[in-house]
Image (cartoon, grey):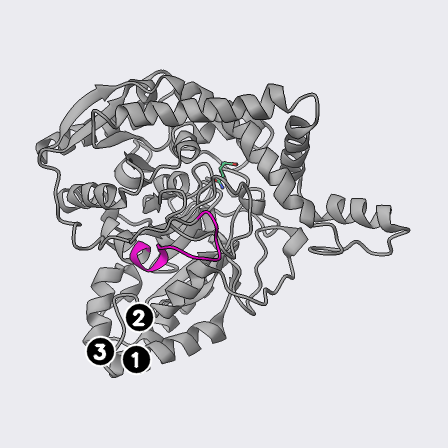
Amino acid sequence: MFSDPTVLSISQLAESLKKRQISSEDLVNSFLERIERINPEVNAYITIDRAGAIKAAQDADNRLDAKQGGPLTGVPIGVKDLFCTKEVRTTCGSRMLHNFIPPYESTVTSRLKAAGAVMLGKTNMDEFAMGSSNETSFFGVVKNPWDLTRIPGGSSGGSAAAVSAGLGVAAIGTDTGGSIRQPAALTGITGIKPTYGRVSRFGMVAFASSLDQAGPMTKTAEDAALLLQAMAGHDPKDATSIDSPVPDYMASLNDGLKGRKIGVPEEYFATGLSTDVASVIEEAKKQFQDLGAELVPVSLPTTKQAIPTYYVLAPAEASSNLARYDGIRFGYRCENPQDIKDLFTRSRAEGFGSEVKRRIMLGTYVLSSGYYDAYYLKAQKVRRMIADDFKAAFTKVDLLLTPTTPDTAFKLGAKTDDPVQMYLSDIFTINVNLAGLPAISIPCGFSRDNLPIGLQLIGRPLDESGILSAAHAYQQATEWHTRKPVL
Ligand code: GLN
């Protein structure tokens, strides 16, 4: 029926699957073939679950034959390797968990599987989701499908590269400070971070629990709506999950932009923005106006406090979350320990990579007595100020529009020796996590050297519908999201 079904979106495929013009099993086989050919170079997947995927596809085909199932039934996706998947290895990109086979399933993956999605495998990521370039993975760097000498962004770089390179119809990522949106922007795909608490964190390997949130990485905003619909909702197994009904995202997808007020925060357009990103975003702003939106200048004065605040809070939470990997209760155990102290220290020294160790040291430091008030407590107060800034802006506007990243994908290795430069990659995304808000990144153009550029739309708490419909309206009028790298 199709010369290459791997280029299609979920909404396009769902129709053909339902009409039985294509079977899920054939589809899965097309993806597995493509993965076999392209993954050795791109390194988007850590684990391919060939047998599991074919079995799930056959089950989906049976449901579809019986006229059952929904839009995700039989659709092959990739899942970031920090969602616990029963009997499928879950490494979190770390040596610490390199052979961990979870005995249980995360809520996100179990909901997606219940909706009929087929998991092709587990995607590569920065170790414990710490990074912006996917260079800290124990399983090797991921390459950007648009230019194999460049990074795909991180930490969900494997998921982003998989979608961009056609190694999955869509993928699931997580975002603690930008890890869905930044790699989505740098690989030319769509990625949404929902409101904190909208999607259950149960069964996700924890990095910074007050910031972590899972979301879809897709070809279109429509596909993101379809996946989020299945993922979102209250979960008694996650005490921070929000107990409020999930709206029908498809029902509002065509709401359009007419009369919507979109705030443009001046701080995001100050120095530091590359000229290519600046000019592409200018064009996109005009397009939003043409589609009927009203652009309103706003100010978010605490923008520059976001990175330092995050790099106190996230490492503090990480140092606590990662304390469980001691070689006894959880994780890698060193060979021939001399005594218990040697076992603890050597297991952690050998099991964790250097970025993770840096975060643990930072985190334990800011939490230690004598420094707690000066760093951790202070950062909590600034976090509230950042959230208040957004709150004030949202009394005037419905959405905010910003660039997702200050620049396009950089060269592999360019920032590995300079953690602060690396941390600055998330300057436009991190404050959204600190405030707990939903935000989406969508493709909006290319640089002169043909690298994708992303635009971010930020919404009010729980207004996923608002950002999805705005993104959809833009994608109906533009074709940036349809461009694909040549591989
Ligand atoms: N790049 C940021 C960090 O290194 C954010 C990572 C993320 O969102 N998981 O912590």
Q: What is the three-letter code of the residue carrying label 2? A: Thr
Q: Are marks 3 and 1 in contact (CB under 8 Å)?
A: no
Q: Which mark is residue 77?
A: none
Q: Position of residue 85 (x, y in %)?
A: 52, 64
Amino acid type shown at disc 1: Arg
Q: Is residue 285 above or below residue 218?
A: above
Residue 317 appears at what percent x and percent y?
58, 38
The answer to whether marks 1 and 2 mark residues whose Cβ atoms lie closer than 8 Å is: yes
Q: Earlier in the sequence, mark 2 or mark 3?
A: 3
| Residue 238 is a magenta residue | yes
Image disc number at residue 20: 3
Whole-number angstrom distance, CA of label 1 to CA of label 2: 8 Å
Image position, residue 269 (x, y; %): 31, 20
Residue identifier under label 1: 63
| Location of residue 344 with respect to 86 vertically, above or below | above
Q: Nearer the viewer, residue 384 or 72?
A: 384
Magenta stretch encompasses residue 273? no
Amino acid of disc 3: Arg
